[in-house]
Amino acid sequence: MSAAGRDTPPAIEARGLSKRYGPLAAIDGIDLTVPVGQWVVVLGHNGAGKSTLLRMLATLLHPTGGNLRLFGAEAGRSDAAPLRRRIGFLSHQTFLYGHLTARENLEFYARLYGLADPEGAALEAIGAARLSHRQDDRVATYSRGMQQRLAIARALLHRPDLILLDEPFTGLDRESSSRLEDRLRQARGTGCTCVMATHDQGQGLRAADRVLGLSDGRLTLDAPSRGLDPSRLDDLLHGSSPAPPPRAS
């Protein structure tokens, strides 16, 4: 690694990161460093804490313990707006306004992110989502898959430095899933950082440099994705064979 690389703060640096709801620990003392440009997939059963972790990384949920820094900046500071403009977040919620059209939704977000040409950015993103023929229809009339495609367009609209994806392939047909994988490969080439939670181990392995296993709010696996296939990964996640050493940062 070059001296310049060593001087660059990580995209994500968490120490003792926790989130509790009364006696329940949704995230329990996680230590995690993700260098700029690394792509990470997070795997785990329902309720493992994947969505909670991503919402904290998106600065939408405040930790109850530990410390989180994004690109060297304290994530819990009072004015997180500049930091949030560097993040693209896809949640189980689409964050779309059903009474607005697709074009109106993306123009709104383009202005929120301070893009120079909101109309042009919105139309380009709608075209990439294959929704141009429905761009002036209210989003409430869209199918679940169409809303997911538009939500992905919203998350990637401003070319964020950090992409956080929670089950991005949910509701997508085979063609849309393939197109999303292509878009993620293109985004990866720009040097941005990504953390993706998914149940699909095959798609996760294809997209990521590094695999994290999460169980009951704790990291149980941290391994490079190279050389892993879904069968081997399933063994590691269920503890039937020793995990390879973590990937060096």
Image: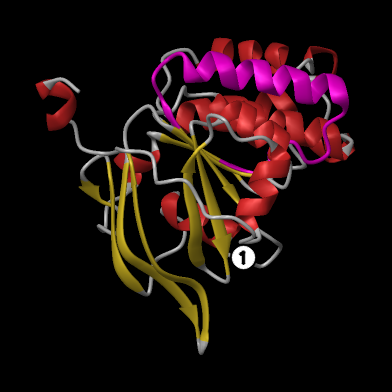
Picture quarter with the N terminus? top left
What's the residue at 62%, 65% (across, down)? 48
Expressed as whole percent of the image width and height from the top left, the position of residue 248 reads 31, 38
Please tell me how crowded label 1 is: few (under 14), some (14-19), or many (20+) other residues with Cα within 10 Å: some
Expressed as whole percent of the image width and height from the top left, the position of residue 172 reads 82, 32
Expressed as whole percent of the image width and height from the top left, the position of residue 34 reads 35, 41
* In magenta stretch: residue 13: no
* In magenta stretch: residue 178: yes
Expressed as whole percent of the image width and height from the top left, the position of residue 168 reads 68, 38
Q: Is residue 54 above or below residue 146?
A: below
Tell me how many marks there are.
1
Q: Quadrant of residue 83?
A: top left
Kindly state the secondary structure of the residue where label 1 is placed: loop
Q: Is residue 237 above or below residue 113?
A: below
Looking at the image, which is closer to me, 233 or 125?
Answer: 233
Magenta stretch in the rendered image: 165-193
Picture quarter with the C terminus? top left
What's the residue at 59%, 55% (across, down)? 241
Q: Inspect this view and state whether residue 138 appears.
A: no
The type of residue carrying mark 1 is Ala
Looking at the image, which is closer to me, 94 or 14?
Answer: 14
Question: From this viewpoint, which residue is outermost toward the front?
Answer: 241
Q: Read off the residue under disc 1.
A: 48
What's the residue at 30%, 39% (across, down)? 82
Looking at the image, which is closer to me, 165 or 120?
Answer: 165
Question: From this viewpoint, which residue is outermost toward the bottom?
Answer: 23
Q: How is the image coloured?
A: secondary structure
**Side of 138 relative to 245 (left or right):** right
Q: Is residue 109 above or below residue 84?
A: above
Looking at the image, which is closer to me, 6 or 235?
Answer: 235
Q: Inspect this view and state whether residue 98 appears.
A: yes
